[in-house]
Image (tube, helix red, strand yellow):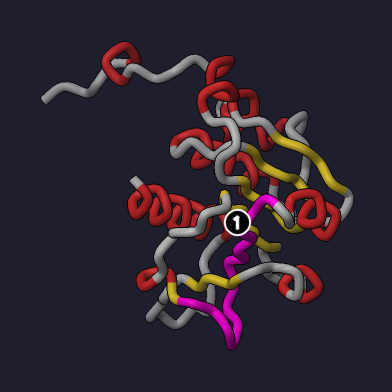
């Protein structure tokens, strides 16, 4: 058994990424406090062709050293945009995107039963590590998804949650 080399993986160059993945899924990061989590989300976004990431509120920008350390260059390939509030980010795309928050609510749809079949592109909202997606933001989304869980903890790390949801969407839509 041999590990695949970078040449055999045939990855696109970071500068070609933005041209290839235009008008696709957007991630909206609602006040994520850890730059390491944000960097990890950028890497997952790059792996699965996410079009853009909106960095909102206290979420760090791409010039953050901790983000860069974790993202390993994905902050260069995946375009991002900063908004002072998540509401502003949602308002900027609400007519063109189907906006889905990932949160545990009394109206959540379970991810394992969910079908990503919307005519519009999708925007996924991920929330703060402690407080989750802000209640005012939840009032402005089209749907809410929940990752089924069976353990004693009530939630997953936001970077892990984003990886699970992005992979599930990628897998179901291919």
Residue carrying label 1: 124
Answer left or right for 81 relative to 121.
Answer: right
Residue 31's place in the image compared with 137, above or below, is above
The residue drawn where x is 26% and y is 15% is 8
**Toward which corner of the image does residue 143 lie, by quadrant?**
bottom right
The residue drawn where x is 44% and y is 18% is 12
Query: 65 or 172: which is nearer to us?
Result: 172
Q: Is residue 37 visible?
A: yes
Density class for disc 1 (Cα within 10 Å; few <14, some 14-19, many ≥20) is many
**Toward which corner of the image does residue 77 lie, by quadrant?**
top right
The residue drawn where x is 68% and y is 36% is 66
**Residue 159 appears at what percent x and percent y?**
55, 53
Residue 78's place in the image compared with 118, above or below, is above
Give yes or no for residue 118 being in the magenta stretch: no
Q: Which residues are magenta?
A: 96-109
**Residue 69 appears at what percent x and percent y?**
62, 31
Query: Which quarter of the rendered picture does the N terminus lie within?
Result: top left
The residue drawn where x is 53% and y is 73% is 155
Query: Which quarter of the rendered picture does the C terminus lie within?
Result: top left
Residue placed furthest toward the left: 1
Query: 44 or 16: which is nearer to us?
Result: 16
**Tag 1 secondary structure:** strand
Residue 160's place in the image compared with 6, above or below, is below
Residue placed furthest toward the top: 7
Give yes or no for residue 100 being in the magenta stretch: yes
Residue 5's place in the image compared with 103, above or below, is above
**Residue 5 appears at what percent x and percent y?**
28, 16
Answer left or right for 170 relative to 83.
Answer: left
**Residue 76 appears at what percent x and percent y?**
64, 24
């Amino acid at each position: 058994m041999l590990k695949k080399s970078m040449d055999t993986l045939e990855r696109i160059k970071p500068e070609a990424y933005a041209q290839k993945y235009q008008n696709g899924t957007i991630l909206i990061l609602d006040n994520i406090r850890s730059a390491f989590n944000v960097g990890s989300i950028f890497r997952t976004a790059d792996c699965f062709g996410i079009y853009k990431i909106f960095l909102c509120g206290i979420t760090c920008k791409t010039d953050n050293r901790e983000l860069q350390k974790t993202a390993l260059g994905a902050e260069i390939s995946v375009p991002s945009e900063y908004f002072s509030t998540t509401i502003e980010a949602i308002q900027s795309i609400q007519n063109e995107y189907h906006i889905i928050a990932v949160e545990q609510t009394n109206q959540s749809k379970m991810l394992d039963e969910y079908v990503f079949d919307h005519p519009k592109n999708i925007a996924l909202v991920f929330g703060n590590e402690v407080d989750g997606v802000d209640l005012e933001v939840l009032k402005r989304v089209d749907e809410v998804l929940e990752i089924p869980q069976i353990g004693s903890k009530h939630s997953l790390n936001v970077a892990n949650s984003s990886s699970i949801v992005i992979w599930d969407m990628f897998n179901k839509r291919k």
